[in-house]
Amino acid sequence: MGVLKRFEQRLEGLVNGTFAKVFKSEVQPVEIAGALQRECDNNATIWNRDRTVVPNDFIVELSAPDFERLSPYSGQLGDELSGMVRDYAKQQRYTFMGTIKVHLEKADDLDTGLYRVRSRTLAASESQDPQARAASPRPGAGSPVTQGGGGYPAPPAGLPPMPA
């Protein structure tokens, strides 16, 4: 990732994080949808002239209040967001290595209105088999992985959360 891209992400996180703290608004699904699209764009890997692969397994970390509000709908919301990612990828001519999954998780370090998206690319056999996922985690899009993270890149240390 280039220096300008990192700067843009930090600036966006700082501005959005400040607004979220000042106005204390809840996370809306449309914000998550936009973040998933950005996650695809930021982690797209060009395999050849005709194929650009993007992550297919996403974790959306939410503040405790936002998680409690959205978790009763997590199955349906995950399916809707997966469909949205699929449609966006089709428009951008992206491809996936396996089934698209979107999971919601609670993150105690986030305030109301803030969220964080992590992603990885899983081959079809891994994304369909939870035991294979636990047995052989793979990093997505060249990002570093922490042990016990299941292949998801670790949240950036010392940076404000990236809300949108």
Image (tube, rainbow, N blue to C red):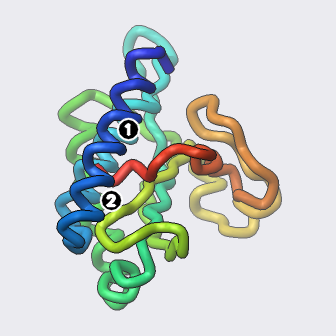
Give residue 82's mark. 2
Q: Report the residue marked by disc 1.
A: 40
* Residue 87, horizontal then vertical, whole percent: 21, 46
Q: Is residue 103 visible?
A: yes
Contact between marks 2 and 1 (CB within 8 A): the answer is no
In front: label 2 or label 1: 1
- Residue 123 in sight from this viewpoint: no
Specify the amino acid type for callout 1: Cys
Locate residue 136 relative to residue 156 in the image: left or right. Answer: right
Q: Is residue 135 above or below residue 70?
A: above
- Estimate the spatial distance between the alpha carbons at disc 2 and disc 1, rounded to whole Å: 12 Å
| The one of 112 and 57 positioned closer to us in this rendering | 112
Q: Looking at this view, is 153 or 111 the one in front?
A: 111
Q: Residue at x 33, y 73 (%)?
A: 112
Q: Position of residue 70 (x, y in %)?
A: 31, 82
Figure check: 30 above or below 43: below
User: Which residue is nearer to you in this view: 32 or 6?
Assistant: 6
Q: Secondary structure at mark 2?
A: helix
Q: Is residue 143 left or right of residue 88?
A: right
| Residue type, numbered disc 2 | Ser
Disc nearer the start of the sequence (2/1): 1
Q: Which mark is residue 102?
A: none
Q: Quadrant of residue 120?
A: top right
- Coordinates of residue 41 in the picture (x, y in percent): 35, 31
Residue located at (22% from left, 42% from top): 88
